[in-house]
Amino acid sequence: MRIRGRTGELQAMMNASAITAIRTAAVSGVATDLLAREGACNLAIIGTGVQARSHLAAMSQVRLIKRCRIASRHIEHGEGFAEEMRRSFSFPLEPVASVAEALEGADLIVTATTAVEPIVKREWISLGAHLNLVGACTPNAREVDSATMAVSSIFADRRESIINEAGDYLFAVRDRAITPDHIRAEIGEILHGDKPGRTSPQEITLFKSLGLAVEDLAAAEYLYLKARELNAGTWVEYS
């Protein structure tokens, strides 16, 4: 829904799931553009759901991808994902049997799963890689192990959210692998030039995506104005 801020008047109803898929991947795209090495081109996507699809598109917008490996709990899901998405991308999409195989040589990594226990281990991650952690958005679930969090420069959409909601962060704190000082910056702070992003080619950078309400509001605002400009959708007169 889009509601006029001053009056509370309902102005539009929209598909929230579609907006979430797009804006989540768009934020990861911004984070990747800011944090990944310029020449990063080998992508690994763990997961084959809606967010995996939107993130494949986002990653291809900010880096010149040469290869993408896809891993899922079931190889047939990865095969189906690759078959579907090959129609839209010119680079090879390769389903593989394990997360370790997907991460071999990857310098761009997206985890978009429903995992509760870590599916990514530190020893599988190459130096200089950038990770976008999209799944595990509750305190009792995580996608990467504590060792990965410990060696990574951690970036957030909002510090308050990652400290209170992100299992990847909270489990690593409980394991005494990291402290709040490991959170280098919020993405907005890098965009404003207040904090640095990547500082060396060998650094492992990690963006933990949790989402902010303002992102949904901004996306809804954009869609509403675009629909009005193009006279798209169904418009209803009411008083």
Image (spheres, rainbow, N blue to C red):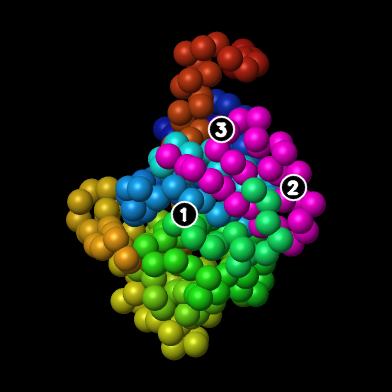
Residue 238 appears left or right of 38: right
Q: Residue at x 44, y 47 (%)?
A: 41
Quadrant, the N terminus: top right
Toward which corner of the image does residue 183 lie, by quadrant?
Answer: bottom left
Of the numbered discs 3 and 2, the one sitting upstream in the chain is 2
User: What number is the disc on residue 90?
Assistant: 3
Q: Label 2: few (<14), some or many (≥20) within 10 Å?
A: some
Q: Where is residue 237 in the image (x, y as percent from the top left)?
A: 62, 13
Q: Which residue is drawn at 29% across and 61% down?
A: 201
Q: Is residue 138 visible?
A: no
Q: Label 3: few (<14), some or many (≥20) within 10 Å?
A: few
* C-alpha gap between disc 1 and disc 2: 20 Å
Residue type pointed to by label 3: Ser
Of the numbered discs 3 and 1, the one sitting upstream in the chain is 3
- Label 1, on which residue? 108
Q: Label 1: few (<14), some or many (≥20) within 10 Å?
A: many
Query: Element at badge 3?
Result: loop
Residue type pointed to by label 2: Glu
Q: Position of residue 117 (x, y in %)?
A: 65, 74
Quadrant, the C terminus: top right
| Residue 77 belongs to the span the image colors magenta | yes
Question: In this figure, what is the number of numbered marks?
Answer: 3
User: What number is the disc on residue 224?
Assistant: none
Q: Position of residue 91 (x, y in %)?
A: 55, 38
Residue type pointed to by label 1: Leu
Q: Which residue is drawn at 61% across and 63% down?
A: 101
* C-alpha gap between disc 3 and disc 1: 17 Å
Q: In this view, does 69 lie above or below 15?
A: below
The magenta-colored residue range is 64-93
Q: Is residue 109 above or below residue 88?
A: below
- Label 2, on which residue? 79
